Image (cartoon, grey):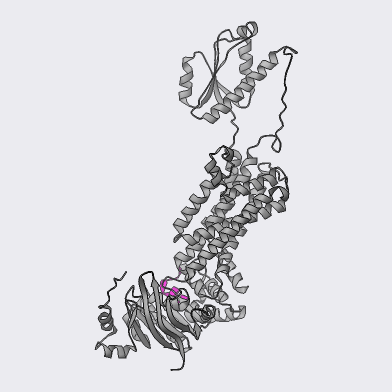
Amino acid sequence: MKQFLSFIKKEFYHVFRDKKTLLMLFGLPIIEIVLFGFALTNEIKNSKIVVCDYSQDEASQLLTQKIESNYNFTVEKNLLSHNEIENSFKQGDIKLAIVFPSNFQQSLFHENIAQIQIIADASDPNTAYTLTNYMKQIILDYQRSILPKGAIPMQIQSEMKMLYNPELKASINFVPGVMALILTLICVMMTSVSIVREKELGTMEILLVSPSNPIMIIIAKAIPYLVVSIINLIIILLLSVFLLDMPIHGSIILLFAESILLIITALSLGLLISNSTANQQSAMLISLMGMLLPTMMFTGFMFPIENMPIPLQVISNLVPAKWYYTIVKSIMVQGLGFAAIWKETLVLIGMTVFLLTVSIKKFKIRLS
Amino acid sequence: MNNIVIQTNGLTKKFGDFTAVNEITFDVQAGEIFGFLGANGAGKTTAMRMLCGLSQPTSGKATIAGCDIYTQTEKIKKNIGYMSQKFSLYEDLTVIENIRFFAGIYGLSDIEIKEKSNILLHKLGLETSKKKLVGSLPLGWKQKLAFSVAVIHEPSIVFLDEPTGGVDPITRRQFWDLIYEASDNGITVFVTTHYMDEAEYCSRLSMMVDGEIKALNSPTNLKDQFHADSMDEVFYELARGAKRKAD
């Protein structure tokens, strides 16, 4: 026990002496949360558009006003001719152009059909699609507003309810994703690097010659990162609750317990990587390449897994963060209890046991 | 001759087809300073790693402080100290933290650690530098500190793998004073080196060539045996026959 304490103390010295790494350890989650929370959002606000109005009548102006009052759009310019449209797009920041043909009002009220052209910059297809949808909605609203009451004999009114996220906030997706990303990344990378460093420096030999149990050496290595990760978890949760207004609906204790489970999974993965690499650079690269991309891609917080080809969907099941992401969403957003997430928990436990067994076996082989 | 602390019999290590250490047999007596010489790649480090329990022998027998190296490795570990070729302290820990850590993993009590670290700091003249990071000390100091830490738990044998590489002659001399002192205190010293002047300081020497021990005697007797004036000549005489390329 005394030996074990000596080890833990030493590992803490290592972690807290290395100011740059420490800054990265605690800075990363804050930056990620702020970035994902504010900068990266699915909503598109204040897109600049141009209007080319050949009609200049009451109806076209009313619709233009409606568009302008919507927070998604800002009318940048009123163009006089069609020819200017392409130029506006080429100059850059214009996302959409609206063209009213001449006699818009007359066609609308007398012929009962009027046309309007929406031209979008589809070099970014997602934005173009979203913006034209916003625009169609505005036009539909306008159309409904000019209809006399009871003009349509039959109507289906659909009422939508966005469960668990009524305001459609993107942070609800991102926060669990960032939690999964940060916890796996830090634990995998830091443990693998710190173990490989001892091998590289030659101090591992000294430790192995000493009467200390190798398993104890490894566990002591993991403990500071466990502590750092728990502090990070607290920071992320505080930021998301107070900065991003994202309440935690479920049990906090359950959330922490599941997070610690993921941390242990990640630590065992880091251990496995450290057993298979000879120097710090390759340990760092393998953990970065092996963790960052798959975690971003296959967790489901950036790209929906359901839309991926079947082989990729199968691969996504190997990423621990994916299961954790589901767990965190269930607890934080839906407020569900353990009964709803026991399967995911079991998968994580299974992964941990597998990784630990393999890496401890490999560690022993190296000794002989 | 009844106080044998290291005894090997036909100790062999093979890596695949390559025989790194080929049936070495020798005894080391308590309190001896035993020099383990050989060119690069002769198999010294491999042999030493087997004796320390870092590597399993392919065949042969050996006992360290009366313990079998196959079955009693845990007992051996408590009885030996080890200082590797690479620098073996933590550069980002202070002098006193390093001492406390290594004393701690050998299971010394707090009182013992306090007592020993005071004596050690005093002996090395590091009292004023005890809160400095080890990384900021000159190499000579680091090596002396590393040696003192390797024997802090008073092992019966200490293994030194090229402990004085890259150190200036004066510091090397001081380092050997520490080795003598440890030897006087009854610690058996098993040391590998490339410096032939250091070889002269040993009580007995073994010369390894191509994984085998080609000569084993006291420095004086070795010089007589090979009709040489210095250890250098003895070394050349033996190493010349080596078939293995040095790395």
Q: Which residue lies furthest to the bottom in this view?
A: B1
Residue B141 is one of the magenta-drawn residues: yes
| Rendered position, A353 above or below B189 | above
Question: Is B43 on the left-hand or right-hand side of B124?
Answer: left
Tell me the quadrant of the picture where the N terminus of chain B can be found: bottom left
| Rendered position, B85 above or below B232 | above
Whether residue A116 is visible here, answered yes or no, is yes
Instruction: Locate residue A344, reporting x and y percent.
Output: 65, 50
**Range of magenta residues:** B136-146
* Front-lying residue, A351 or A110: A351
Question: Is B146 on the left-hand or right-hand side of A107?
Answer: left
Tell me the quadrant of the picture where the C terminus of chain B can be found: bottom left
Instruction: Locate residue B99, reporting x and y percent.
Output: 53, 75
Whether residue B163 is visible here, answered yes or no, is no
Question: Residue placed at 63% from the left, 24% from the top?
Answer: A70
| Rendered position, A151 above or below A170 | above
Question: Residue placed at 48% from the left, 53% from the top?
Answer: A286
Residue A45 is one of the magenta-drawn residues: no
Residue A230 falls in which quadrant of the image? bottom right
Instruction: Locate residue B52, reporting x and y percent.
Output: 47, 77
